[in-house]
Image: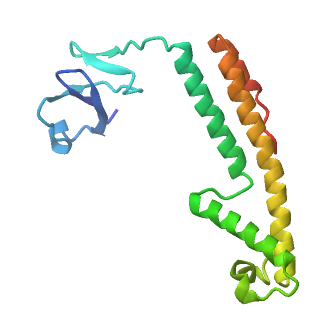
Amino acid sequence: MNEHLGIIYEVATGHIVKNIRMLRRFTVMDHYELREGQAFLIGQNAEDIDGFKVEADALAAIERPTPTIEQIRRGAKEDIDRAAGVCRSEVASQGYGQEMTYLAKEVEARACIADAAPVAATYPMMAAEVGITGTDLAAVATEVVARADAWKALAGSIERVRLAGKQSIDAATTEAEIDTILTDTSWPN
């Protein structure tokens, strides 16, 4: 092999700062500068630098305490929230500004539909979509309201699954039960 493998670590704690890999024709010092309190361990790499430390010039696995059921629940609820976000993102663009735009468009579209004689100057968001979403203000507003209503139905279904999943996680008493809840959760599409 034409490479040097190694680890830069903190001498006092054994904490691995980074894995290093370089061509053999160079020395470690040619590429890396150690900070005060750091050292090299040459010839090894840690696949998971957070799971190992250097002890007595060798890699040692870091013992992790067994998580409590509350920690497992908290992590599982975060997983549920992330999954709900992914499900929503498959239908609607994400981002605070985009969400505000959707809400403003819905309000404007509903007002436009209720207006007996809508004009572009009064409904600028609808006017911006004429020729794209619909042929005139009324057609755009109708389409925007239809999309908003469809979104609300889907969002309600996603929220029901999310909240039911969290409720089930709260009731679970073992990690296996929580794993089953996460695996068996079925998201709407």
Q: Which of 56 and 171 lies nearest the eye of the viewer? A: 171
Whether residue 129 is visible, yes or no, is yes
> How is colour applied across the structure in the image?
rainbow
Q: Which of 59 and 165 lies nearest the eye of the viewer? A: 165
Residue drawn at 13 percent across, 29 percent down: 37
In this rendering, the answer to whether 141 lies above or below 122 is above
Q: Position of residue 45 (x, y in %)?
A: 34, 27
Rendering quarter of residue 115: bottom right
Does residue 156 appear to the left or right of 63 in the view shown? Answer: right
Residue drawn at 56 percent across, 20 percent down: 72
Q: Which of 179 and 136 lies nearest the eye of the viewer? A: 136
Q: Which of 180 and 10 lies nearest the eye of the viewer? A: 180
Location of the C terminus by quadrant is: top right
Q: Which residue lies furthest to the left in this view?
A: 36
Rendering quarter of residue 82: top right
Whether residue 6 is visible, yes or no, is no
Q: Position of residue 36 (x, y in %)?
A: 11, 34
Q: How many marks?
A: 0
Q: Where is residue 159 in the image (x, y as percent from the top left)?
A: 74, 40
Residue drawn at 69 percent across, 16 percent down: 171
In this rendering, the answer to whether 111 lies above or below 51 is below
Does residue 143 appear to the left or right of 77 in the view shown? Answer: right
Rendering quarter of residue 1: top left
Q: Position of residue 122 (x, y in %)?
A: 72, 85
